[in-house]
Amino acid sequence: MSIPAGQAEAAALLGRLTGAAPVETHISAVYVGRDRVLKLKKAVALEFLDFTALDARAHFCRRELALNAPAAPGLYRAVHPLTRGPDGALRLGGDGPAEEWVLEMAPLPAADFLDAMAARGALDAPLQDALGDAVFALHDRLAPVEGWDSAAALRRVARECRNAALATGLPAARVEGWAVALSARLEGLAPLLAERAAAGRVRRCHGDLHLGNLVLWQGRPVAFDALEFDEALATIDTGYDLAFLLADLMQRVGTGAANRVLNRYVARGGDAELVAGLPLWLSLRFLIRAHCLQRVGQDGLPWLAAAEAALHPAPPRLLAVGGLPGTGK
């Protein structure tokens, strides 16, 4: 990954201001200083976004701030222009014409990110409960979106996932088999998805709710880095938003942790019917992670296997326990 040549001067300034080298993704460069973090959106065009125009980068910096600040007061601070000073040098802030835009955040210890905590076995039961509470609170403050066709939106996502998975070189026969099975599951759930949309379960959600986008902030888990560049991808059923977190927990921590977070979330909001949609939603989330990992040279096969397995869950079992009262059944 690299920063576009036209942003080299801005990148150098951010490096000097923070004393840090950038942490890069394909769409951003993040400079983590001692007292602040400065995030630069790269001037790139990809299949799912276009940040090449300065106005677009300004808009999406502001959009990221607006989406994330309510859930994490103090974590997201401000959007700043980069302008020319009297000496002609680029500076942070100022009144002149903006030549670039950056987002300022508070610094976060790397150890406090929930993916790092999961890796060292620190996602204990109380934190899992707090995580369920946090996701419920995040969804509860969002307004329902009316008139949304969840099944049609998920059909588009499924097609894009299939194409992306094939393009990364994941086994074609398995990907095609997954696509057929997922389509059947989706069509069977279409009436339920419509009922949930009519009941207000579709909202403008986080959209990218995995452990790497959750952090301990002021002693509680907080979601950040909500998907800002595609309203359609983030306008989803709250159960589908939750499913990315559950999928990540299943792979990184275990099904017990995922089940505890799910139970806590349902207990808080009473949305037990979301369980019926989980095989579909989990499978999509697993496959998204599979092709994303495969694209950057990591092993996506375990996630592909999980995507396949999610569409064929084990049938439920009813267990009856008998015995005399007080015997420790």
Image (cartoon, rainbow, N blue to C red):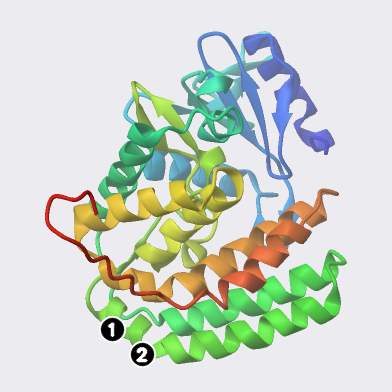
Tell me if label 1 and label 2 are in contact, CB under 8 Å. Answer: yes
275 w.r.t. 27: above or below? below
Q: Residues under labels 1 and 2: Cα distance? A: 6 Å
Q: Which amino acid does label 1 sit on?
A: Glu
Q: Residues within 10 Å of mark 1 (few under 14, many from 20)?
A: few
Left or right: where 250 falls relative to 193: right
Q: What residue type is labelled 2?
A: Pro
For label 1, the SS is helix
The residue lying toward the viewer, choosing from 9 and 303, is 303
Report which residue position mark 1 lands on. 195
Q: Position of residue 184 (x, y in %)?
A: 56, 90
Left or right: where 13 falls relative to 143: right
The residue sitting at 68% across, 71% down in the picture is: 161
Q: Can residue 118 be seen in this view?
A: yes
The residue sitting at 34% across, 22% down in the picture is: 219
Q: Can residue 98 be seen in this view?
A: no
Report which residue position mark 2 lands on. 191
The residue lying toward the viewer, choosing from 327 and 143, is 327
Left or right: where 300 falls relative to 297: left
The residue lying toward the viewer, choosing from 303 and 9, is 303
Q: Position of residue 233 (x, y in %)?
A: 51, 65
